[in-house]
Image (cartoon, rainbow, N blue to C red):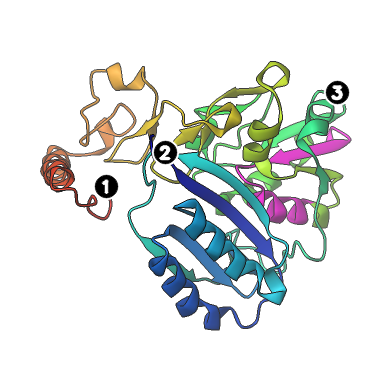
Amino acid sequence: MEQTYTVAALYCFAPFARYQDMREPLKALCQEQGVKGTLLLAAEGINGTIAGKQEGIEKVVQFITAQPELQNPELKYSTAREMPFHRMKVRLKKEIVTMGVEGVDPLKAVGTYVSPQEWNALITDEDTILVDTRNDYEYSIGTFAGAIDPNIKTFREFPQWMAGHDGELRAKKKVAMFCTGGIRCEKSTAYARGLGFDVYHLKGGILKYLEEVPLEDSLWEGECFVFDERVSVGHGLVEGDMTLCRACRHPLTVQDRQKPHYVEGVSCEACYEERSDTDRARYEERHKQVQLAQKRHRFPHIGH
């Protein structure tokens, strides 16, 4: 029987003044249970994705939700054929998702939550404008039909994009926003509410939609980028066909990997003109070392 790993993506906004005290016991528990991934702790709550054996994931989730402040996280489970992370990181941060705007607090004001089952009706309403709050490379491999691409490199750029498209957004009665798991929209819709928009938020994000909405009813096109070694998932949260360019971390389709400038571990069409021959020689040597490490059953190097 093929072994699979349980992947848990979670976040919880909550006043969490003692977040620094949780770092070491949480990290120790994850290591003890063979759980890997990244968890971010801040005064505003917790965010992250972890993977491991089902029992280990359950123990870590139980520990997190046993904290009075974190009892009701947004939590989504999926599976992976191989361990999708190389190590466990528990980091202390200023924000659990970085928007960089002071005073944006999802606990005070947030967009209207819309369930996956109600989402199609909202985004096909002629009075709605649909905005993808994710980064450009995420949008490039999949999005909802009719969604606007802000063409941003990081979430920090989103408020500036909104400022530059204020008139376009206000031309519609309703603004609908979505992201991978829902956390970026907690901040983006809180920000939009502060600007006076009637804004809506896909509860649980794309992942919850792909989990719960049947393929025949879906308005999703393509695959959904995820921030681990699976690279992408599709309907039912099954692993997709994407890989990463190890030089620039850009997601690559099967077709992208057939293009002239694609060399595994070294380059792709997206980064070939931006990198030098010296860079590519360095990437090639790193790729060789990674392959050797894999043959010895060791995890790839940092940055691979």
Q: Which residue: 36% across, 32% down?
A: 243
Q: Which mark is residue 126?
A: 3
Question: According to the image, label 1 marks what residue?
Answer: 304
The percent position of residue 226, horizontal first and vertical second, equals: 49, 41
Q: Quadrant of residue 3?
A: top left
Which is more N-terminal, label 1 or label 2? 2
Q: Quadrant of residue 212?
A: top right
Mark 1: few/some/many CA within 10 Å (<14, 14-19, 20+): some
- Residue sitting at x 55%, y 51%: 8
Range drawn in magenta: 171-192
The answer to which of 228 and 62 lies nearer the viewer is 62
Q: Which residue is mark 2?
A: 230
Quadrant, the N terminus = top left
- Dot 3 crowding, Cα within 10 Å, few <14, some 14–19, many 20+: few
SS for callout 1: loop
x then y, percent, for residue 120 = 79, 26
- Residue closer to the observer: 38 or 128: 38
Q: Give me the disc on residue 97.
A: none
Residue at figure coordinates x 54%, y 78% from the top left: 22
- Give percent across and percent down for residue 183: 65, 53
Q: What's the amino acid at mark 1?
A: His
**Lower position in the chain sequence, tag 3 or tag 2:** 3
